[in-house]
Image: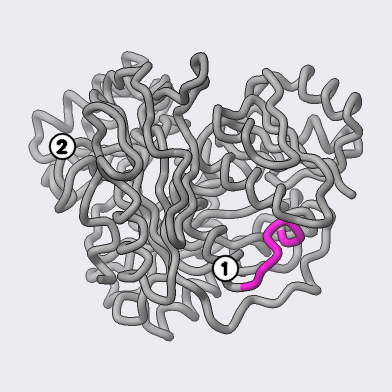
Amino acid sequence: MQTVLVIGSGGREYELARQMSLSAAVGSVIVAPGNAGTALLSKTVNAPIGPIEIEAQIALVKERSVDTVIIGPDASVAAGVGDALRAEGVAVFGPNLQPGKLESSKAFAADFMKRHNVPQPEFWTAGNLEEALEIIADKSPKSYVLKADGLAAGKGVVLPRSKQEAVQTLELMFSSDAYDGAGMTGVVIQERLSGPEVSAFAVSDGKDIFMLPFAQDHKRLQDGDQGPNTGGMGSYCPVPGTIVDSEQTAKIHDIAKKTIAAIASDGTPYQGVLYIGLMLAKQRGGDPVVIEYNARFGDPETQVLLTSMQQSGVDVADLLTSAANDDISHLQVPTSVKASLTVAIAAIGYPNSPRKGDVIHGLGKKYKNVVVQHAGTAKKDSDIVTAGGRVLYVTGFGDTVAEAAQHAYAAIGKDGIHFADMQYRTDIGYQAI
């Protein structure tokens, strides 16, 4: 019986912990630091240790005889948590610091793709404001994307609508911590392409890959992809063949295999999940082009992907712990996949200044074909209250995306899950539905 440590506190980590707790091969689950929901899962306890508190994590691993560690957040990867725990002889699902730079440095990722002939937009890198202004001087502001070089909590990408906005954004990136400090030492200016976006996730043991279904995220706060950019207001999977056809699917799988092989050839095999953000670019005849890499599961894609895999007969705990222990060759990708769809419920004021402390109602009820995943929640006396921007994810599942959406939305509202002034989108999955 394994003891598994999940690092993180959001909806992604809730679902990772839930999957571990469902496995007969897992005896106990620790979530560090976790949230009010993870504390309620079977076999699961929270530990008050932050995602980059490496010495405390090492002490916990030794004290509790942890067999496998699953890294949730990007900050943990960028802090070298994987390196430190592997040095202690622990199996880790999550890459080391060096391959993790595919996410933590946009410039590193662009250079990596150039060296290994991975399809990407044209790009330019700037180490200071003067260089950046020179690069954009003769370009239309709607022809490029500005990307802060570093981790920016999913908000370091700007699509300027005017020259003035582009200049102001670059000034902010280079001179302030407006993007969580990302961009102060460098910016990548990337050709702006158009077309459907697709999220691909490859679980790797360093050699082989296990492709999860494609998903689509919804970044904007409001219906119709309006409003400010957020960490993600919902997601669904699988993406239908009307959006990604068989030829495009094969090309995406080839990109995933090439990327994992290239990382290994660079000297540090990748164990964990690699997120590949793609665009089926109209400017490239619909071919997939890599827009970005992430060195961990996405949030909220994790909520739908793992729910979908579980409902499709995959032992998710076995998949992730096997990848951490160097061998996923015995696992088979399911031939048919159940659909899942998640709706993020956010606090008023999100994404800028979310209000905290509102009592959440409806959590004790049973909902048909629905999993409720906690993110920004806390315990206050006998109540569960809001404690972050994205508070909960309500994930429905079924045979189709439309059916999954029906189940998810039926569980939200005054007769279901609700709290004061909550925000959520009513059109998640519109691309497929």
In this view, 249 is above or below 91: below
Which residue is under mark 2? 137
Magenta span of residues: 313-319
Question: How many C-alpha atoms fall within 10 Å of the one at disc 2: few (<14), some, or many (≥20)?
Answer: few
The amino acid beneath tag 1 is: Gln
Residue at numbered disc 1: 311
Residue under the point 28% across and 31% down: 132
**What residue appears at the point 37 percent right and 55 percent down from the top-left corner?**
235
Which disc number belongs to residue 64? none
Q: In this view, does 282 lie above or below 84?
A: below
Residue 120 visible, this orientation: no
Whether residues under marks 1 and 2 lie with C-beta atoms below 8 angstroms apart, the answer is: no
Observer-nearest of 164 and 377: 377
What secondary structure is found at the residue carrying circle 1? helix
Circle 1 Cα neighbour tier, 10 Å, few/some/many (<14 / 14–19 / ≥20): some
The C terminus - image quarter: bottom left
Location of residue 184 in the rendering, given as x and y in whole percent from the top left corner = 39, 21
Considering depth in this image, is 427 or 319 the residue closer to the camera?
427
The answer to if 317 sits in the magenta stretch is yes
In the shown orientation, is residue 268 left or right of residue 336? right
Identify the residue at horizontal 30%, vertical 28% (top origin): 347
Between disc 1 and disc 2, whose residue precedes? Answer: 2
